[in-house]
Image: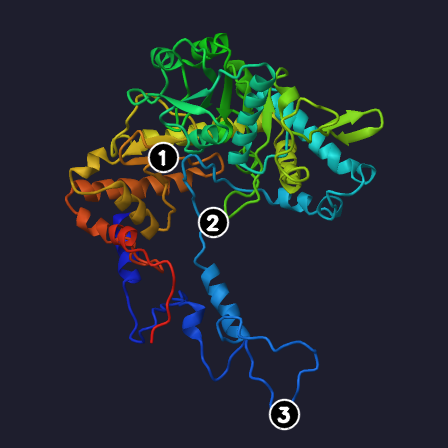
Amino acid sequence: MIAELKMDQAMSEQQNDFGDGNVGLHYEESLLWEKEAGDHPGVDLPTPKGLKSRTGVAARGEIGLPQVSEPTVVRHFVRLSTWNYSIDSGFFPLGSCTMKHNPRLNEKVARFAGFGNIHPMQPESTIQGALRVMHELQGILGELTGLPGVCLSPAAGAHGELAGLMTIRRAHELKGNAHKTVILTPDSSHGTNPATAAMCGYTLRVIPTKETGRMTVEAFKEALGDGHDVAGMMVTNPNTCGLFESEILPIVDLLHKAGGYFYCDGANFNALVGTIRPADFGVDVMHINLHKTFSTPHGGGGPGSGPICVTEELAPYMPVPTVVKTKDGFHLETEDDRPTTLGRLKGFNGQFGMHVRALTYIMSHGADGLKQVSEDAVLNANYILSQLKGDYSVPFEGPCMHECLLTEKSLKENGVTTLDVAKTLVENGIHPMTVYFPLVVQGAMLIEPTETESKETLDRFIKVMKWIAAEAKAGRGSVLHENPKSTPRRRLDEVKAAREPKLRWKKSN
């Protein structure tokens, strides 16, 4: 393995003598503005001589685009596209992101004419099939979570968080609980949790978890106090350390006795689907990332989808629209139908294409398949943990859930950091894991293999990780500092980039 890696590295260092950076079929690519050639512009064409404008409007000035030909533009963007890394080209072990294979069947179904060619302002009588898809998805998500109130409209995970916490706020508002102004959350929570609480006008109170990676009843009691001012709690379960909150039941019991609601961040629902319902450990409201758990496109700007599921008690307060079934067919519920709602959070009815993809994924797997998905995701993460715990530091004892957490602690005495590990993975054709998160662990490496990766893929990742650790412990860490060497761009001087950022390209004289 080490010999292969060194051979690949040596080959990547070969250079030609033409100074353009092109090697083999790997193309270096400059900015379009650097390709301008005044003798054959491609945008602002020269004004023909001897002809007057017949449009009746003033001549247009230069629009500021690079003056290049169409073939140059096409090649530029095609070459840039070859630099992309995606789940279709390689392993994506990003912790807390659930980057797994997207079955092409989902895409095919989403493009059916009856789904792809409709408009949200069509009369309900003409989109009954689409509304049925949404209604069936609502029912299945309610069954999987044990939370019967489901609203599909939130556009992604953070939007779902906002919808969930606004539902809690609306419930307290109509119940006259103006004194409840505090939200509790662990110090390991996703950054969007405290941001969402602040956006909803709440004060945040943090629950420390640094000793075990989990909340304890004692730490929760201290944060709760007498509970008079506590509106709710935002917790991810499994949490961002890849661990199940083992004391969640007594903690939620104390929260509910104080009149607070439990919002569960559903980012890690892939570890639970079909094995346990969040309602069974006391969840009142949670969002689900359809674009993670149910394998719709993730990242790249979307489209995402973050429905919320709530208890029967909170259902009157969640956003509209939801799809309801009447004797006349399916109907989009409005504020007039449910006056207690917090209102609309989004124009129209949510990311409908994501609803189709998610329902296709769910129906393809069935109940037994969804259960196996979560079990295999947990199995893969524990396999990686078992193979690497002797090479890297493991901050918390015991098995993990769907993602495992390692740290740089055992490498740092040899001058190797988490960043060096990540950059060396890039050099060897593997996208890095999530690094330096969660923040409660120094030099964190959060690895989520998901259920769709084969043992062969995991074994190669493990071999590279073991080789990195061996190089560090043998005192050869200086080689790792230079990675990546064969990528289109090398490692940045991050301190200089932060202090002297260059945010705009300037044409050289």
- The type of residue carrying mark 2 is Ser
Q: How far across and how far down the image is residue 452, in percent?
A: 49, 37
Report the quarter where the C terminus lies.
bottom left
Q: Residues within 10 Å of mark 3 (few under 14, many from 20)?
A: few
**CA gap, disc 2 to disc 3?**
53 Å
Taking the spot 29% from the left edge, 52% from the top edge, the residue there is: 5
Q: Earlier in the sequence, mark 2 or mark 3?
A: 3
Give the quarter of the image for residue 441.
Answer: top left
| Location of residue 348 with respect to 341 vertically, above or below | below
- The type of residue carrying mark 3 is Gly
Tell me whether circle 2 and circle 1 mark residues in contact (CB < 8 Å): no
Residue 14 visible: yes
**CA gap, disc 3 to disc 1?**
68 Å
**Which residue corresponds to mark 1?**
446
**Which residue corresponds to mark 3?**
50
Tell whether 462 sits left or right of 154.
Answer: left
Residue 146 visible: no
In front: label 3 or label 1 = 3
Taking the spot 21% from the left edge, 43% from the top edge, the residue there is: 416
Tell whether 212 sits left or right of 173.
Answer: left
**What SS does tag 1 mark?**
strand
